[in-house]
Image (spheres, rainbow, N blue to C red):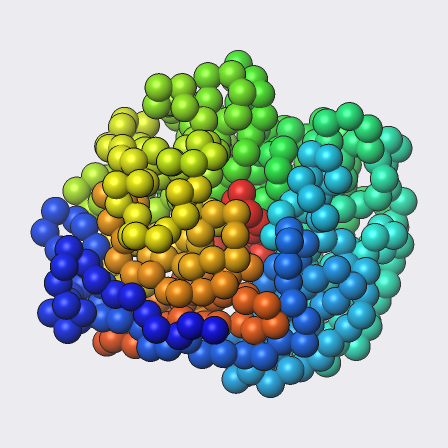
């Protein structure tokens, strides 16, 4: 495995850039090169599209640990790399496109971590292939509960599980989702259960939820009332009632995100990408549609939502474009106005695949107000990069054989790290330079951040 790291920005040496938080004009600059990755040995590999990784505090020591899934396996590793437990189980992870084989989509981990019973410690929850909710002690992996639930008529099984707060009592509720078994599969079936009555009647159910075609439902507390909404082309309230629906909507959604895109509007907004029709990007919330925009009717397909330019108020929406080769990314500001575009071929380093990037996630790497984006080479177990979304400039390239890439705050200084699953190893890349803003609260203190890191997949990292 190659360990050398390539680090350059505009031809300047890394030493000249160390400690620079951000540059004039709002563009990011690295805070110094990362050390070689910390390596954790895994007991199994994660290949193809099945399975993934999440991070959570499993053993109560206030450090982030790791849960990795693959067909027939669920494993947990401590922050220091020691294995906590390993379980052979038919965890529900997708073996292909969700629109043909069902949820929860490419790279989705199919697992949740939360304190669902209110007792000391966390639980790990996942569905198996038999519509059974499995609940494990997060510290030991011991099975605490197994409940098989009837799936909706017209579906094969329950396929996607999300922990949520629907009654204002904390993470005590469970959402289940299933697709139609025949035809183009969409996860229209959703049921909500109180965890303490998991074997009873649901709190509510619906067969008319319109979500993403390629990934399972995501949740966020959009209005700040302490309860989660279910995000999609339809937004469902915590009581299951439809709160909003995208107007004049055609085709389907490829990916979906939520954050405070417009600080001038109360609450959080939802950003979703359309495939079909005019190929639009939508920004909307509980109050309705805020804006819709397209760029030359090019399919946006994948996006990164973040603070990429401090000169522009609110958050920016970077869209990768659909092209199989020679991608042409473009970026909208928080009001749907085009900020810029470029050809990936013009900015990618020599030897980078002509297919571009995939699994793109915004990352607080430098500690400055401006975020970078992390991604891997598309359609291969290849290298990983950090780049500036607005300009496309590659800031760092990590020689890798990445099967999965995941971005999260695991070191504890609120900045984020790059986690790479490569074969039977987990590689953790950390920015070792001094943090220019060490007093910032950890990102995990934001409920929508915590939810997003539990419900990610290939299309919606």
Pick the residue in front: 202 or 307: 307
x then y, percent, for residue 93: 72, 53
201 or 108, which lies in front? 108
Report which quarter residue 433 is drawn in: bottom left
Q: Is residue 265 visible?
A: no
Q: Position of residue 426 (x, y in %)?
A: 54, 72
Give the residue at x 52% y 84%: 80
**Above or below for 435 versus 99:** below
Question: Horizontal placement of 128 versus 380: left or right?
Answer: right
On screen, 154 above or below 461? Answer: above
Please count the marks in the image: 0
Residue at horizontal 50 percent and vertical 27 percent from the top: 274
What residue appears at the point 40 percent right and 43 percent down from the top-left corner?
A: 354
Is the residue 39 above or below the residue 451 in the image? Answer: below
Q: Is 282 on the left or on the right of 263, as rendered? A: right
Horizontal and vertical percent position of residue 301: 48, 34
Q: Is residue 29 visible?
A: yes
The percent position of residue 279, horizontal first and vertical second, equals: 46, 22
Q: Is residue 231 left or right of residue 343?
A: right
Please tell me which residue is depicted at 67% across the width and 76% down the height of the picture: 43
In the picture as drawn, the residue positioned furthest to the top comes out as 248
Q: Residue furthest front?
A: 351
């Amino acid at each position: 495995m190659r360990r050398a790291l390539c680090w350059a920005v505009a031809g300047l040496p890394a030493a000249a850039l160390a400690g620079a938080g951000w540059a004039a004009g709002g563009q990011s600059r690295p805070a110094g090169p990362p050390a070689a990755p910390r390596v954790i040995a895994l007991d199994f590999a994660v290949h193809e599209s099945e399975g993934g990784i999440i991070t959570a505090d499993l053993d109560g020591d206030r450090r982030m640990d790791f849960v990795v899934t693959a067909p027939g396996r669920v494993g947990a590793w401590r922050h220091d790399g020691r294995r906590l437990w390993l379980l052979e189980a038919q965890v529900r992870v997708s073996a292909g496109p969700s629109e043909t084989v069902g949820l929860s989509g490419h790279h989705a981990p199919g697992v949740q971590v939360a304190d669902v019973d209110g007792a000391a410690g966390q639980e790990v929850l996942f569905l198996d292939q038999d519509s059974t909710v499995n609940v494990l002690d997060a510290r030991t992996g011991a099975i605490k509960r197994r409940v098989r639930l009837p799936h909706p008529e017209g579906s094969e099984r329950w396929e996607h599980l999300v922990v949520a707060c629907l009654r204002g009592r904390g993470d005590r509720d469970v959402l289940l989702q299933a697709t139609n078994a025949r035809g183009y599969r969409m996860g229209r079936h959703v049921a909500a259960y109180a965890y303490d009555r998991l074997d009873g009647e649901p709190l509510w159910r619906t067969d008319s939820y319109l979500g993403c075609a390629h990934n399972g439902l995501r949740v966020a507390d959009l209005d700040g009332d302490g309860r989660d909404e279910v995000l999609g082309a339809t937004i469902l309230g915590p009581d299951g009632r439809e709160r909003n629906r995208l107007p004049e909507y055609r085709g389907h959604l490829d990916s979906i995100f939520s954050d405070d895109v417009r600080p001038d509007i109360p609450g959080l907004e939802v950003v979703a990408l359309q495939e079909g029709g005019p190929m639009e990007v939508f920004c909307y919330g509980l109050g309705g549609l805020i804006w819709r925009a397209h760029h030359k009717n090019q399919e946006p397909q994948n996006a990164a939502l973040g603070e990429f330019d401090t000169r522009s108020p609110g958050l920016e929406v970077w869209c990768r474009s659909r092209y199989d080769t020679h991608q042409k990314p473009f970026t909208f500001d928080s009001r749907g106005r085009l900020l810029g575009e470029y050809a990936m071929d013009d900015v990618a380093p020599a030897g980078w695949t002509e297919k571009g990037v995939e699994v793109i996630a915004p990352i607080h790497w430098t500690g400055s107000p401006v975020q970078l984006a992390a991604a891997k080479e598309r359609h291969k177990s290849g290298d990983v990069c950090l780049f500036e979304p607005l300009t496309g400039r590659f800031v760092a390239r990590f020689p890798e054989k990445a099967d999965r890439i995941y971005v999260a705050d695991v070191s504890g200084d609120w900045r984020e790290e790059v986690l790479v699953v490569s074969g039977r190893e987990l590689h953790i890349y950390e920015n070792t330079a001094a943090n220019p803003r060490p007093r910032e609260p950890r990102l995990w203190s934001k409920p929508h951040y915590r939810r997003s890191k539990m419900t990610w997949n290939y299309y919606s990292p």
